[in-house]
């Protein structure tokens, strides 16, 4: 029999905080055994294959055990922390005294009313209604009274015991036939697959509470009692540690490597380049910084490059697509989730701005600012990195002229932006120093042929050379 202490311990399992994640590394614990936690309190930070995520606990209680130390990679669905939700106030309920032979036998349960395994629901019961509340005598007290009369009078039942017997007859079948619980609690038990006849009630008058149902649905106590995993001794290095350092491939970097290999060997990549004079764009950036409507917003060349790409996609919508290998279909997207590649201490991540095509320039600037600051803090959520359609990677911030970027899986194009440098340039028939950059567009040649890819890249370059086209082409 599971004691109340064991039933009050809840096991919190490693959740899947993204789509299809199978594991996560525990970066930091914010609680220790003995600490009190409340519903919604963050107890640890984990790193998935996509981002670092803080995990809140879904109930109140006291931490009993942390099953894994920091730095451990844990499979999704594995219990990571045990919490005692009883609060130390509840005591084990006493065993009910058995009803003696002096009490009438309870009614026979219908054939359909059989005990069932937790997780398979409760079999259909009879249509008998629960008796209305009235002056009733608890079964244990009634049984004890009758037993006392039998023991004290040689088996002769007195008038007092006879008066108690009808109460036992009225109460016992009702208690054994249908546990006391409110409708919401019954629905919760049904959803969790808990048989209410197996639940030990803790509420007044023997009513089953939501906490009782949760306790009954908790994992077996063997999981709680299981010892914490023993850390294996560190392997002896087989290389010269003074000349080499080896870093395990995991987390974001592991996922990025797998995605890039899959993309490079699945989608036939084509990359085209164009060098463009962006002097006017740089002047517009400085003017926008002084605009009252852009006050407090992140205004830089990337903002106008992103807007230029969105306009080019609107003029060439076929480039915003994906290849469905399973169904052998080309999926044309009527929305643009614009990805922005961001370098973080944990590796490269690509969060995206949802429905970027609908945003005004100030709205786009605000979204870019939030995206960058969140990525730098390591707080980007997995949802923010899902569903991208096209991406921009700004390699120019590292002083690089350009590159040949690899497509993000499921996307058709990615634009690389090189460093903006002052270079000699022929302008109006004369060689003058101008702000110049090189753009590189990689695209999936199954979806985008050379003509379409060239049009998109040429449109972006034309807008950056003459940013007034943002108005005329809008």
Image (spheres, rainbow, N blue to C red):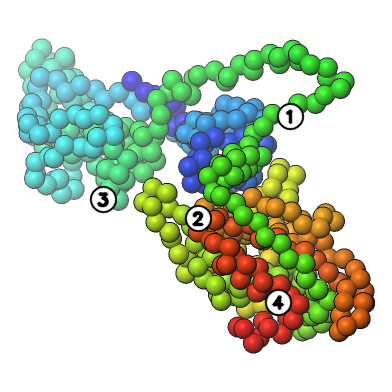
Residue 397 place in picture, x, y as percent? 81, 58
Q: Which quadrant of the view contains residue 30?
A: top right
Mark whose residue sits in front, 3 or 4: 4
Please state, as top left, top right, bottom left or bottom right, where the C terminus lies in the image: bottom right
Mark 3 or mark 2: whose residue is earlier in sequence: 3
- For the residue pair 257 and 127, the one nearer the viewer reads as 257
Measured in 3D between alpha carbons, the distance from the residue under mark 2 to the one under mark 4, in whole angstroms, is 26 Å
Mark whose residue sits in front, 1 or 2: 2
Disc 4 target residue? 462
| Residue occupying image coordinates x 40% and y 32% | 218
Disc 3 target residue? 183
Mark 4 or mark 1: whose residue is earlier in sequence: 1
Q: Residues within 10 Å of mark 4 (few under 14, many from 20)?
A: some
Residue 2 place in picture, x, y as percent? 36, 23
- For the residue pair 126 and 209, the one nearer the viewer reads as 126
Q: Which quadrant of the view contains residue 152?
A: top left
Q: Residue furthest bottom?
A: 472
Mark 1 or mark 2: whose residue is earlier in sequence: 1
Q: Secondary structure at mark 3?
A: helix
Measured in 3D between alpha carbons, the distance from the residue under mark 1 to the one under mark 2, in whole angstroms, is 37 Å
Disc 1 target residue? 247
| Residue occupying image coordinates x 81% and y 73% | 277
Measured in 3D between alpha carbons, the distance from the residue under mark 3 to the one under mark 4, in whole angstroms, is 66 Å
Disc 2 target residue? 446
- For the residue pair 57 and 471, the one nearer the viewer reads as 471
Mark 2 or mark 4: whose residue is earlier in sequence: 2
In the rendered image, the vertical position of residue 226 relative to residue 90, given as above or below: above
Q: Secondary structure at mark 2?
A: loop
């Amino acid at each position: 029999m599971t004691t109340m202490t064991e039933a009050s311990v809840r096991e919190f399992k490693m959740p899947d905080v993204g789509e299809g994640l199978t594991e996560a590394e525990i970066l930091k614990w914010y609680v220790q055994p003995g600490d009190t936690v409340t519903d919604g309190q963050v107890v640890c930070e984990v790193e998935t294959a996509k981002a670092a995520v803080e995990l809140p606990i879904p109930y109140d209680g006291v931490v009993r055990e942390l099953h894994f130390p920091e730095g451990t990679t844990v499979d999704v669905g594995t219990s990571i922390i045990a919490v005692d939700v009883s609060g130390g106030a509840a005591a084990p309920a006493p065993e009910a005294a058995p009803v003696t032979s002096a009490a009438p036998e309870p009614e026979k349960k219908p054939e359909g009313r059989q005990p069932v395994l937790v997780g398979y629901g409760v079999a259909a019961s009879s249509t008998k209604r629960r008796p209305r509340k009235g002056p009733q005598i608890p079964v244990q007290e009634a049984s004890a009274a009758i037993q006392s009369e039998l023991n004290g009078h040689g088996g002769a039942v007195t008038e007092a015991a006879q008066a108690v017997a009808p109460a036992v007859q009225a109460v016992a079948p009702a208690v054994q036939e249908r546990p006391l619980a409110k409708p919401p609690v019954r629905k919760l038990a049904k959803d969790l697959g808990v048989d209410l006849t197996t639940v030990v009630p803790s509420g007044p008058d023997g009513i089953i509470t939501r906490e009782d149902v949760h306790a009954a649905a908790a994992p077996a106590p063997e999981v709680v009692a299981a010892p914490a995993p023993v850390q294996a001794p560190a392997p002896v290095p087989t290389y010269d540690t003074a000349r080499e350092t080896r870093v395990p491939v995991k987390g974001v970097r592991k996922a990025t490597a797998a995605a890039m290999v899959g993309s490079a060997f699945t989608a036939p990549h084509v990359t085209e380049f164009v060098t463009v004079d962006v002097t006017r764009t740089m002047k517009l950036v400085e003017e926008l910084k002084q605009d009252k409507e852009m006050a407090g917003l992140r205004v830089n060349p990337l903002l106008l490059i992103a807007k230029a790409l969105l306009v080019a996609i609107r003029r060439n919508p076929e480039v915003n697509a994906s290849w469905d290998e399973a169904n052998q279909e080309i999926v044309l997207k009527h929305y643009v989730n614009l990805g922005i590649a961001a370098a973080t201490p944990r590796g490269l991540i690509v969060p995206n701005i949802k429905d970027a095509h609908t945003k005004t320039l100030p709205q786009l600037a605000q979204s870019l600012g939030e995206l960058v600051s969140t990525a730098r803090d390591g707080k980007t959520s997995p949802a923010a990195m899902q569903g991208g359609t096209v991406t921009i990677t700004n390699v120019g911030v590292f002083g690089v002229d350009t590159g040949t970027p690899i497509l993000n899986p499921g996307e058709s194009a990615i634009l690389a932006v090189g460093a903006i440098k002052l270079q000699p340039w022929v302008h109006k028939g004369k060689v003058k120093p101008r702000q110049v950059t090189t753009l590189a567009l990689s695209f999936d040649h199954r979806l985008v042929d050379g003509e379409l890819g060239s049009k998109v890249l040429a449109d972006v370059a034309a807008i950056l050379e003459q940013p007034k086209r943002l108005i005329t082409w809008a």
